[in-house]
Image: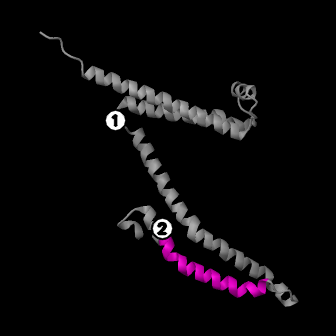
């Protein structure tokens, strides 16, 4: 309802702000009302204590969920939707060279993910070639090292793809600007 005439993030903030007062008042009155029973030490109160603890902590946790977690998840969902749309647009590009580079880079990144993070998850160590590089420098082999290797590999791959793309664009520009011989 809020996002019909403006952006998603301002709408999420306004919706959370509109829910702030009723949620806090409901939580505060219930928690404050059950507070004395929570700290009562009589035998009759001991019978009700599990219910009181469940209500107090459940309402407190529910307040955090309603006011912080759910709005955050809505914003994250929008980010993933934008990524998915952009990815499938990349797969449907008309230029076959650009599409081939996109698909190839996607396969390379997923393959590198499997060779680093996936290998460590399955075998609890890096492949021998990568493990040798890291142990030479005295770096332990674990999931953190695999993640660092994955990120470094992705950065190198993106740098190479950027250089190749710029080189192809430069060559295309040079071919289009060739001077015809003077007569």
SS class, disc 2: helix
Extreme-front residue of the structure: 137
Residue drawn at 59 percent across, 33 percent down: 152
Question: Quick check: is 9 in the magenta stretch?
Answer: no
In the rendered image, residue 181, in percent from the top left (x then y), is placed at: 17, 11
Which quadrant of the figure contains the N terminus?
bottom left
Left or right side of 183 for 146: right
Quadrant assignment, res 156: top right
User: Which color scheme did the rendering employ for the protein?
Assistant: one colour
User: Label 2: how many residues lie within 10 Å, few (<14), some (14-19) or many (20+)?
Assistant: some
Residue drawn at 68 percent across, 82 percent down: 31
Q: How far is the residue under mark 2 from the one under mark 1?
A: 39 Å
Left or right side of 107 for 100: left
Please give the residue where the numbered disc 2 appears in the rendered image: 13
Quadrant assignment, res 171: top left
Please give the residue where the numbered disc 1 appears in the rendered image: 94
Q: Main secondary structure of the magenta part?
A: helix
SS class, disc 1: loop
Question: Quick check: is 25 in the magenta stretch?
Answer: yes
User: Label 1: how many residues lie within 10 Å, few (<14), some (14-19) or many (20+)?
Assistant: few
Q: Looking at the picture, does residue 85 appear above or below residue 156?
A: below
Please identify, in this view, whether the residue under mark 2 or under mark 1 is nearer the observer.
2
The span shown in magenta is: 15-38
């Amino acid at each position: 309802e809020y996002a019909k005439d403006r952006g998603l993030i301002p709408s999420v903030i306004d919706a959370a702000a509109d829910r702030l007062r009723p949620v806090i008042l409901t939580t505060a009155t219930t928690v404050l009302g059950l507070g004395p029973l929570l700290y009562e030490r009589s035998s009759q109160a001991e019978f009700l204590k599990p219910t009181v603890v469940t209500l107090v902590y459940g309402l407190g946790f529910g307040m955090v969920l309603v006011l912080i977690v759910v709005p955050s998840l809505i914003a994250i969902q929008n980010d993933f939707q934008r990524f998915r749309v952009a990815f499938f647009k990349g797969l449907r590009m008309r230029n076959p060279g650009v599409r081939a580079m996109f698909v190839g880079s996607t396969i390379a990144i997923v393959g590198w993910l499997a060779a680093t993070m996936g290998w460590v998850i399955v075998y609890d160590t890096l492949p021998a070639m990568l493990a040798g590089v890291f142990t030479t420098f005295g770096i332990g082999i674990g999931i953190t090292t695999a993640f660092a290797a994955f990120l470094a590999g992705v950065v190198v791959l993106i740098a190479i793809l950027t250089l190749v793309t710029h080189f192809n664009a430069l060559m295309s520009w040079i071919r289009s600007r060739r001077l015809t011989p003077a007569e």
